[in-house]
Amino acid sequence: MKEPRNESTTSPVSIALSSILPFLTSHPFLLLFCALTLRILTKRYLSPLRSIPGPFVASFTRLWKVYSTARGRTNLEHIALHRKYGPLVRIAPNEVSLSSPHAARLLLSAGKRFYKTDFYGVFPPPENPDIFTETREDVHAMKKKVANVPYSMAAMRQLNGFIDDTIDVLASRLDEYAAPEGEDLQREKAQIGAENVKKHQVDLGAWLHYFAFDVLGEVAFGRSFGFLAAGVDVEGAIKTIDDSQWYNGLVGQIPELDHVLRRNPLWKFIPALDPGNALVTRIAREEMAKRRPFAAEKEGKGVSGDGREDLLASLIKGHLKDPSRFGEGDVFAVAHGAIFAGSDSTASTMQSFFWHILSSPRIHATLTSEIDLAVRKGSIPSTGNIEWNASQTLSYFQACLKEAMRVRPAVGVNITRYVPPEGAELDGHFFRGGTRIAVNGWVLHRDKGVFGQDADVYRPERWLEDVEKTRIMERFMFQFGGGSHVCIGRNLALLEINKVIPRLLRDFKFELVHPNRELKAKATFFVVQEGLEVYIERKNVANA
Ligand code: HEM
């Protein structure tokens, strides 16, 4: 017969605890140390992600991500991380970065239910999310349906006039700085000495930035923001947006922090921190106020009086059709959000393009000969603006543009999605529901399997070599994201880029002032770039 258990026997564990706990509570620092060690050990070794390699600190705290984002080099650091650790890298206790373009396609596909994370909730206005910041998929789909109308390529072509006018302003502003050509140049050389002629230089990057903003002002609100006219960042508006994006990218790594920072009601008492005071927001508000009670839109008219309907007018019409599904707040949020989403992104893409082509005399020469030849053949006009269809005939230009978007995509921080509740397999690994998965275009676009062994190199020819290979590479380009959250403004961005860049290359000669210097780039959400200073000379295409 079994001996009855002696209930009063004290287990060794309880003896140990009863002696250790009083000791620890009387030594709070030691207690803190033990708690932290326990947290580190559980996050690091008991997590379902424990087998995925990555920086040790990242496995137990999101602060690693904050640190990495704060340095403004997330894009480059992630390339290095994947080279060191492989295709899956644990970058936070519950977050993994993937480098496989195949896995990224699945992650971003519509209908696969990998939804946006709370990272996006930090982007303002949190109380009235726009298409980019809306994380509720059903609400997002409803808003995007309305907004898709004015962003379609057909609608964008209708806005061609706005873009043309802004290109004319950019070209004439650059013309003020450009060195003369031909006989005029000889005259100037004689007057000021040949060595001084090259002093005609501009910060092309800044002018492209002003251009991207002014186009958006015209497209969204039927009025320019006036950056090109002023030739400066009026009221520091661009800097305000860049700073705000830097905050969003950084705080988005630990979104809870937003409640004690920007969403903290005390901020409202510091006017300089109130984004409502910023130029772009002010203009957006003024335009909304001017158009109320939306009489013109009720009659189905545009606002500019010349038949052109801006984004705001089109969104108001969408709102009038179904105010309960697309409220007035949505009209404002979507039109205003377009400026934030579409300005730095487009500017960064154009800056990358110019930096790459000007850094290679061979590529630059091939591209300019293509454009000069197109003028001589009459496939693009010798003066004035260039239409979308005409720029599509410039195959080397198209290859240079794709290659710029591949090597230096405009979004520099990670795009993140949650794994659906039932879990999912990505790149051969099963992830539990709720795991955060991150992808970064800078990493994905360097995949050697898809883009070739020389994927790190800027080489436009890769897009012209083999039709089948090109088709595959196009499938795995993520510069505009993908799936249901694919960039809504890509038609606009491509339209303006396809019109303005060939025109600038047709009308001016450019040369880098600092040929061996990298652009100064900071990955906020977008890669904000500086340092594209060029020598500029007027070009007579007939003599080219
Ligand atoms: C070359 C220029 C551009 C690039 C490279 C770019 C890139 C991107 C990327 C990568 C995304 C997906 C982000 C994510 O899933 O987190 C995105 C989304 C978005 N973009 Fe763009 N963008 C550009 C221009 C524009 C323009 C001109 C506009 C508006 C005028 C715009 C508005 C948006 C919006 C509203 C979204 C959110 C779409 C959604 O979630 O459904 N973008 N863009």
Image (cartoon, helix red, strand yellow):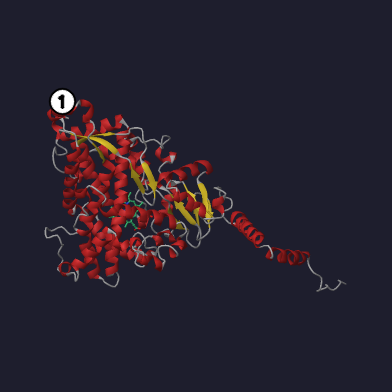
Amino acid beneath label 1: Ala
The residue under label 1 is 190
Q: Quadrant of the N terminus?
A: bottom right
Q: Taking the image as four quarters, which one is ligand 1 found in?
A: bottom left
Graded by Cα atoms within 10 Å as few (under 14), some (14 to 19) or many (20 or more), the crowding at tag 1 reads few
Q: Is residue 45 left or right of residue 412?
A: right
Residue 172 location, quadrant: top left
Residue shown at 17% from the left, 27% from the top = 189
Q: Percent from the top left, x then y, of residue 409? A: 36, 45
Element type at mark 1: helix
Q: How many marks?
A: 1
Q: Percent from the top left, x then y, of residue 13? A: 75, 64
Residue shown at 17% from the left, 52% from the top = 162
Q: Quadrant of the C terminus?
A: top left
Vertical comparison of 319 with 339: above or below: below
Q: Percent from the top left, x then y, of residue 91? A: 51, 51
Pick out the residue farthest to the right: 1
| 232 or 148: nearer the viewer | 232
Q: Percent from the top left, x then y, of residue 419? A: 48, 58
Vertical comparison of 201 with 1: above or below: above
Q: Note whether residue 370 is visible.
A: yes
| 74 or 498: nearer the viewer | 74
Vertical comparison of 349 with 362: above or below: below
* Ligand 1 under 8 Å from disc 1 Cβ: no
Residue 182 location, quadrant: top left
Q: Note whether residue 326 is visible.
A: no
Q: Is residue 4 left or right of residue 157?
A: right
Vertical comparison of 28 with 462: above or below: below
